[in-house]
Structures are given as C-alpha cells and as structure tokens.
Image (cartoon, coloured by chain):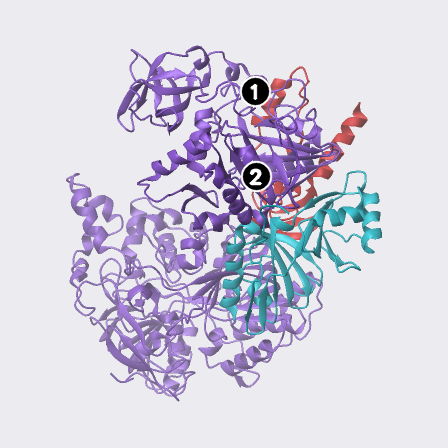
Chain colours: A red, B cyan, C purple
Amino acid sequence: MIIDHPLLGPRDAAEFVYLGDASLIDRPDWQAPDAMEKFHAYGYLRDNPAGEHQELWYHEQGDRSWLVVTRDTVTHTITKVELARDVARGKTKARGRGK
Amino acid sequence: MAEFTLTAAPPLAGHDETFGDTRLHAPQDFAIVSVALPLGGETAAKKAIKTAYGVELPAPGKSVVAKGKERILRLAPDLAFVFFTHAGADAETIVADKLKDKAYLTDQTDVWTALELSGPMARAALERICPLDLYTDAFALNDGARTVMEHLGTIILRTDDDTYLLLSASSSADSFLHAIETSIKNVI
Amino acid sequence: MTQVNRLPGGLVDRSEEVKFQFNDKWMRGYPGDTLASALMANGQLLVGRSFKYHRPRGVFTAGSEEPNALVQLRRRAEQEPNTRATMIELFEGLYATSQNHRGSLEFDLLAINDFFAPFLSAGFYYKTFMWPKAFWEKLYEPIIRSAAGLGRLSMKEDPDSYDKGFLHCDLLVIGAGPAGLAAALTAGRSGARVILADEDFRPGGRLNAETLELGGMAGHAWAEEAVKELAEMDNVRLMSRTTVYGAYDHGIYGVLERCTDHLRDSNGKPRQILWRIYSKRAVLAAGATERPIAFGNNDRPGILLAGAMRAYANRYAVAPGKQIAVFTNNDDGWRTAADLYAKGVEITTVVDSRDKPALLNIPGARHFGGQAVMDTVGRAGMKSIQLTNGQVIPCDGLAVSGGWNPNVHLTCHQRGRPEWREDLCAFVPGSDLPPGMVVAGAANGAMTLAAALSEGAVKASAQLEDLGIKPKGGEMPQAEDEPRDCAAFWHVKQSKNRAWVDLQNDVTVKDVKLANTEGFRSVELLKRYTTMGMATDQGKTSNIAGLAILAEEAGKTIPEVGTTIFRPPYTPVPLGALAGRARGKDFRPYRLTPSHKWTEENGASFVTVGNWLRAEWYTQPGEKGWRDSVDREVLQTRKSVGICDVTTLGKIDIQGKDAGAFLDMVYANTFSTLKVGRVRYGLMLREDGICYDDGTTARMGEDHYVMTTTTANAVLVFRRMEFVRQCLCPDMDVHLISTTDGWAQFAVAGPKSRDLLRKVIDRDHDISNDAFPFMACGHVTVCGGTPARLFRISFSGELAFEIAVPARYGNSMMAVLNEAGKEFDAVPYGTEALGVMRIEKGHCTGNELNGQTTAHNIGLGKMVSQKKACIGNVLSQRPEMIREDAVRLVGFRPVDRSRKLIAGSHFITKGDTASMANDQGWMTSVAYSPNLGYSIGLGFLKEGQNRMGEIVRAVSPIHNTEMEVEVVSPHFIDPEGERLRG
C-alpha cells in the first residue's frame, strides 16, 4: 500500500505503523459522571466496517506524524489523508464552540 | 589537570573507501542539533533562524545551506536538524548561542552516524535498499527524507548530483555500513 | 550425441558451440538455445517422469507455462529442483538431471504406478488408504511421502546471494511482445519514465517465434530494432529475464529479476533480485498461452503444443522429429504446419476438428476435416496416431492446438474476474482490473499481430494522457491480421485410453468427470478434489480445458461454471529471493553499546536484548561457570562498587512549556510538581489500567525533562507519547526526540560509588550526600570538561549513580571508570548481576510488568493519581482490578534453603490439590542470591501482602516438581532503603 502523506507525498505503507480506528482521538472526559462506561467503550468497542474506515497510522520511519487515513477496507482505496494533530485540534475547537 | 582523559571514538570515524569512482566515507566532525519550534512561537523561531543563518527555514522534506555552510533540514512541521562541522561535544551550545531561547534544542550528534555516498553508482546502490524515488525530478538537490533501509531508520539527503548523505542510528552503525557496502558491491 | 533434430536458420548463434550435460551425458547446443531446445536438438525427447503415474514425459511448451520438462539444474549445493527446461538458457558446462524417477529415467521403477492407475484416481488418498486405520501413519503415509514430490533439495545452504530493490516509474509495461514493445515505444518516445519487464532473455515475445512481418521487416528484426531504440532512452529501463509475478495495492508490482541464472557462476553477485516496482500506471501485455486438446495418451514425448513446436522451429531451429502431424481446432494450428514445412520438415497430416476445407496448402500433408486424434502409440516417443475415423498415421511428432488463452493472471490479483468471450473460446480480462492497469494485445484478446501492435500503442497513449503526459510516436508499422478462427473443442470423447488435462499433476478427463459424479461441481472444489491446476505451473495449460469438461458434464455453459481466479505469484518465486539479504547474521541489524569494544576486550559474554548486544557477565580467570562470575560481580558491587553499561534504556528528551502537564498525562503519577534537579520513578499504564512501562524521569530544567524507558519498550513508549502529543494533547507545547544512542550511560553502584565518581567528575561539582542527595540530577563535567549528566538513582538498592557522557566517549569512559575504580576493586557487571541485584531489592522488570498486571498487583496502586487526567487511571479503578484479594507482588524463599526456585511455578495453599481451581499465583523471577546464600524469588500471590511468613507450595507441572516456599517481603536486601540514601 501507499499512503499519500499530506506533507511528504506518497510513501510506502512499510514506513508506517497501524494503530486502529481514528475514534481513539475522541478520548472521553475522565471527570464525566459516566467516565467508566465511556472509557470502556473507548477502549474496547470498535466498528468493523467493510468499506470506508477512518484509521490512525503513525509515520514511524518518517516524520513521526500520526495520520488519519480514510481507507476502504475492502478495496484498500485511500480517499483522504490528514495530519491527526489537525484533526484533533479541529475537534478541540469544535468542543470549545459547543460550550 | 584531570587525572583521567576521555578520547572520542565515534563509530565509523575515518571510514573512507572507494569502489571504482564511487566513494563511501564518514564525514569528519559532523555535528547535528535538533531544533523544535515552540507551539505559538513558530514565527519567532523562524525569525531567529533567519537572523542566525541568513536563510528561511525550508518546507518539510527540504534542506537549505546557510551562509556559514550549515545545512538546515526540515523534518516535520515543528522539527528541523542543523548540520555543521564541529569537533567538540558542545554543538548544542553553539546553536543555542545563535538562536537564543527561541527554539528547543537537543544535541543529536552522537545519536546518529553519517555516511556520504557519492559517485556514478550511488543511485543504483541506493535502489537496492531505499524505498524512496531518488530520480532527479522526484528527489531534487537538497531534498531530504527520513525512511527505512534494511530495517534501519535512515535520513537521506541529496547534497549534490550524485552525492547522498545518509544518517542512521549510531548504535547500529556496523549494520548500517554493512548494508550500504553490500548495496554498492552488488551493483558495481 | 549430435544435433540430429537441428533445422536451418533460427535465432541461435551457430558461430560457437555450447557443451552441456544431461543425466551425465555430454551434449552440444548453441548460444540462444534453452535447455529444452538443446535437448530436442540432440534427440533427447524424454526429459522426465510425471508426478503421480511416473509416465515418460517430454518438453510440451516453449515458455514459463511448461508442465512437463522440470529438471534439477546444477549440482551439489547449487542444485535447484523443478526448474523449467524451457526457461533455462544454455550455458557452457550446464549440468542438469531429470527428476521424479527411481532408477534411471528410461527404466523408472515407480512407473508401476501407471499400472495401478485405476486405484489412483482423484481422491484416492481418501478412498484407498482407509483400512486398517493403524496403517495410515506407519505404512501408507511414509510410502506416499517418499514417492511424492518432484525434485529433491540439496539440503545444503544456498551458496548464492539474493538482493531486493525498489524502482519507480510512470508506466510499467509487462511483457515485451508486440503489444508491450508498442506500448513501451509510445511511452518512451513521449518522455515518460518507463520500465519494460519481460520474462524471456530475448525481448520480442511471439515475434521471435513467428514468421510474421512488420512493415516488410521480419518480426524478430523489428523487435531487435525496437529494443535498440528503447535501450538508448534514458527514461526507459529494459528488464529482460524479469517476471512481474504479482499486482499489489496502489500500483505496486512484485518483480523477480534473474541476474545470473544464465551464467555458469554468479561471481559473487546476487543471483536474483526481488524488485518492488512503484508504478503510476501499468500496461499488462503478457500475451496468451496455448492450450492442448485432451485425447488418449496425449502426454507422450514428442507431443507439443503447436505454437511451441513453431517456436522451436523458427526461433531455435529444432523439431522434435522428422515426420510431424498437426491436430488443431483453430486456424493458428495451420501455421505450425506451414512454418515447419518451410523449414524442410515433413508434415504427414493436418487433423482439424472443424469440418471445413484446408486453410493452407501443405504439400505432402493429408488433411482430415471434422476428425480428431483419438489415441497415440509409442512409449518414450511417438510412433503413430489413431484418428477418430480409424486411420492410423505414422509420425514421430505431434503438434496440438486447442486455441489460446489470454494471460489474465495479473488482472485477477485484486479479485478481478475474467469474462468469457465466445468468439475466442477463452476468458479475457474483466472490467474490474487492478487500479492503474490496462491490458493490451493477446492478453486482452487482441489476438492478431496488427491488433496487438495498435492496442499496445493506443492503451499506452491513454495511460500517458491520464498522467498528463502528451503521447507521441505511437505510429506502428503495417502488420497483418492473421486468421484466428477457433472452435470450442476440448477433448476427444471417443478416446478410450486416459486423456490428460493437467500434465503436471497427472489429472485426466476421467478424474474431472469423477469429480462431477461425486458432487465436486464448483470449479473451486474441482480444483481441490482433483488437484488440477495446483502444481508449480498453476494449471496454465490445463485449467480451461478442465472447467470446459466440467461444464459439459454438468450440462452448463463455461460462463455458468465460471473460472477460478489467480493469486500471486505468476510463476514460482524462490524462497531465497523472498528472503533477500535477511539470512544468517544479516537477518536483522544489531546494536552495540558505546562500551562494546572495552567490554569485548575484558572477557564479557554477550546476550541479545532486542537488537542490542549486552554484556551478561565478565569471566575472570579461574571461574568455572557463569554463576561464579555473576556471584562475584554481585558481591563485589554490594561490598565496594560495580559498573554497568545501561545505555540501552530508552532516553527521550522532552521539552516545552507544557512538558510537565504532558508527563502528567502519560504517567500514572505526577511530574509537573517535580523540582528542577530531581528525578522521580514513573509508572505508565495502558488505557485499560494494566501496567505498560516504568522508568525514571529527570527534570533538567524548567521546560526540560529527560525520560528513561525500559530497553524493550523504548520504541513503543516513544510512539505512544507521540500519539498522546498529537492526538490527545494537540494544543500542548511539548516536543519529543530520542537520545537513546546519544548518551553512553553507566550505572556506578555500591558503597564506594561516590568515591569512585569523585575521581572522574571535575572537582567543582559537589556530589556529597547533602549537595547531591538520593534522586538528584544535574549537569556535570568529567575528566577535565567533558559535559556529562549525573543521576542519583539506584536499581541495585545500593548507593548508586548513573552517569551519562556523549556516546563517542562511552568506550573511553568505561575504561576510565574501571581504571579509577582499581583502588576499590571495582568490577564491571553484566545483565545477570543486574538481574540478581534487582530481585534482591524487589524491583520490577518485564517479568512482573508482563501485560497482565496492574499497579495494584505490584503494590503501587496508590501511585495512580485520581486527581488528574492520565492514561489508564479511569479503567484501573474497575472493581475487578482493585480487589482486596488480588494477587500482590511478594518475595519467596525455599523452606529447604538448598533448593532452587523455579520461575513459572504456581502457588498452591498447603493442603490443597494442585489444580487450576486452587491456583494462588505464580513465581515471576528467581535468582541465587550470593548475599543470602540461597535461592530467592519474586512472584504474585493472592492477598500476598497479608500472608507474610506463610508456607505455600510452589508447583511446576512442566518440570514435574514442587517445593515448599515461605512468603517474605520482596525487599530481600536493605528493606529500609538506608543504603541508597547513604
């Protein structure tokens, strides 16, 4: 596979390490009243779609960036690659606005 | 006068061998300092770099040669390496004097071992271990990248038409040298 | 032997002769021959025995699809079994032997299997060897195993080397036949970066095997010109002897280049290279493979595919005999008759299954329309054929053509399904091709020369336009659209004798019918039940006929039955090539500690820890075993001072205004409150609350921490910290960089450690207990100004320091510390002594933090802060994980002090039976303590903290032992910690 790094261009997937579902970015609030249930879901419950999937890849043999890769698990077609830090910042901002 | 003295013995120091017109050697006194740009302080850090070295911090994957022959390689949005020739164990101090406190510095000199591969067979040899496209248009002069060669994390920089600077972890210097030497021997 | 079957002309170089040996017989051929053509030239038609029935077999094809002519090439360690004679280029001194016979090739003792054929039909394993049951393992299986298989391995280490490599291109062209050459020329002339890969040693494909002309030029001559033009282009890389064996994701192709297989000697160069080609676009121009027709005894030496016989005549200038018959169901077969006749070979007969007039006039040949060959006579060669009309016609060679199958293999590698084309009686590539790939020429069903040429150019142009490259130079010379009519005709129903479908796995028409009768009616089941298509040739010549017969039997059409699809590799790839350089000590890189040289010179024995080589102990003269060395190192360290290289621990430099807050998130305990100049032990949890890693982190400055990790987890901890930094705390100002290799770090431990260090650390640094107490850290200089870092931390439980210098001084520093330590009888110590001392002190390592244990289990439950966000603190509080009766880390000693504890033993309460239900925990680490004079251990015991002094049983069913042990504090030495604070 080839991952088209948003800054560095196409790189062989061998340079990357796979982690899993990009929902791992959405870490629950440890002080929430139902924190235990939320962390349980965060830690253990995953969707396993046959089709489009957002997932985390780490460019370990590269610039050490974490990426959010949108990949079709059936065809391996990759439609989007983003810096996870940007995605995470976007979510923090969105949460900030919500308050 | 101290009772004991320490002698420096970096791995691969003095290594220099030729294979026809192709040469593999370890550059002498090759100092490396990492420069991390503070979050929110990027502009100040870039300005400090410009003032100190007379060049703009290049884009990730690119390097630039400064007025004092230092080479600055941007590895990631918030990380660059400065390469320069310096013998002492105080490379970080030298960069710190230039950049003041505008960036976070870490001496990386002894973390890495450097080999310069040059000559007509350099690219053919690298084809055997480097997954990157090193074709002239794809990996231009002063381009740099971090990748993996023979299981070893490696930074590769194109410093001239047929010249590549290769950096890998100093602890695995023997394996690194062996990998490059084998590649050269397999193509000449 | 002389070259009795050599014809005039051809593309072999007659200016020199090449001598070679087959079954120890010397023969001669020419440069440009394959082993197959040279054997044929020498009249050696019998080249091997078949897999199951040990039938005599000869060369059947002229390419990589060869099912029969498998030989063992070379000898001794270089010997390579199952090598296709059709792909071996002849070289001086070549040595080959036939395989799969007991006794000589001519008189194979196992040919008796042929007489037992009625018992050896499809599925015979399951039917014949049923009874008695006990015979299977003892008798049947050993016999079958010894009889099965084709070639033999040398069982010696492969003396050749292999390499791997990476190539990049705009357009990968697979196959250098007319379509491939047209595609490569178009792309090359347009300035695209092109790789043209072809499995043959002579590019040109069928142009080299035919007498067709292009623009008034002989086909092979045009191919030569085209190759010359391509070779002169800097943007084109020509790779002959190179097979594209797999089409992988995102335009990546797996490619095998055979570099020295055609040479007598590799001369130290890699024999083969496994390339990974990254292509933006690809043109598959893999051509087509001819298929046979099944009829009685259709497997004799001398029976060849018609196109192959034509290739041998035209390219290699050989024929398998003097009187040739042709059997065809299509127009193309007629070309064989014409071309061989033109070479002066007598054509006795052309048998055409189609009832229509002769396509060509072949002088002297009788034409039988609407007839078929029903049987053949001969043994190791051909004598005659018998037609369906009863006619018997003498001949010593038979050319068979059942039509051509496009080579769709690579189009299927991403689950593409070929589609049936009635007019060709063949499957062609479907529409679901691997992204970036197009198919051109015969591989796409464009079967004539003119069509192949034009399709190659047109498809390449479209690919270039896709890439934004303007195509130019796609005009190809004039060529003909030769007649290609073909009738669906798969096997001769009138044949009474066995008719082979899969020659390599000995599958007959009857086997296919049997599969249908017994209910194995899908193609996938047919394949597995009969083994059709499962040999090294993957059924290239047999699959279609097999499923056509199945369709006929089942009363379905071929598209209804469908086809199996193909997986990589297209042709076999040697394991040596897949391994590349990764063998022996080059299997993986190794890492050396900075003091490696000194360590080696001073009697160390090394152990592999991850990729690191670490000293496990240092042997002194007179020491009889490792225990002597380890005991001495431990005792001397605790008595005076010991020195150990601990560089392998991961070191991570952490800087930024939010570094403290970041560490609070990463560690279970708090670091933002740590004072500058102090070190703290830190425990990391996984998000599920299980212990992950531990180490010490020093605060070197307001915004600067230095973390150590365990050796094993250095990379993983860094990865996770980057995850936290980028994904969980993206707005923190914090930066990470590894400095593991940058600092040579040494533990200096023991009551004399401060005295020793005072001799090395420059005098202006005060390291007294007041100025530099336990858990202090700071910058110092050593040996007259060399910068260093000093940490007052202790793994051994003694007064101890760790001192770090830039790695370049590491070897020298080790020597200096030992030299300076001479007056204290300082010892260097290795990982074993380190392990003994940490067990004596009750410190955890990977044995205890094994991915199953919590902070609560190791007695550090209180360390997990509930006052801040951090990884793992929420789930660590799940009731099951903080049970009062959970296992807890405690120490153990044997009641009988002379006994040796065994790690991995499980604890059972006295009086209970040793069963899983009564399991009370397990022993994690054991060591002989030279200070105490007996074996000690650490382990997890249910409610261990409340069971001090209790005697439990340590049971090891694996060792079949058990012993009584006493539960004690895990701190065997200095439980109050007075020494390390001294």
Compared with residue C257, is residue A90 higher up or lower down, i.e. above or below? above
> Where in the figure is residue C133, as x and y percent of width and height?
17, 38
> Where in the figure is residue C959, as x and y percent of width and height?
28, 29
Q: Is residue C597 visible?
A: yes
Residue at x 36%, y 59% (from the top left corner): C536
Q: Nearer the viewer, residue C627 or C562?
A: C627
Displayed quadrant of residue C758 = top right
> The C terminus of chain C is located in which quarter?
top right
Q: Mark 1 falls within which chain?
A: C
Q: Nearer the viewer, residue B178 or C592?
A: C592
- Look at the numbered disc 2 and give the secondary structure of its residue: strand
Label 1: few (<14), some (14–19) or many (≥20) C-alpha neighbours in 10 Å? many
Kindly report the distance in space between the C-alpha atoms of the residues bearing marks 2 and 1. 26 Å
Q: Is residue C254 visible?
A: no
Q: Nearer the viewer, residue C678 or C253?
A: C678
Which residue matches tag 1? C876
Same-chain check, marks 2 and 1: yes
- Look at the numbered disc 1 and give the secondary structure of its residue: helix
Compared with residue B96, is residue B144 higher up or lower down, i.e. above or below? below
Label 2: few (<14), some (14–19) or many (≥20) C-alpha neighbours in 10 Å? many
The amino acid sitting under disc 2 is Gly
The amino acid sitting under disc 1 is Ser
Displayed quadrant of residue C510 = bottom left
> Where in the figure is residue C945, as x and y percent of width and height?
46, 13
Which residue matches tag 2? C650
Compared with residue C66, is residue C904 higher up or lower down, i.e. above or below? above
Answer with mark 2 or mark 1, whichever residue precedes in sequence: 2
> The N terminus of chain C is located in which quarter?
bottom left
> Where in the figure is residue C286, as x and y percent of width and height?
50, 66
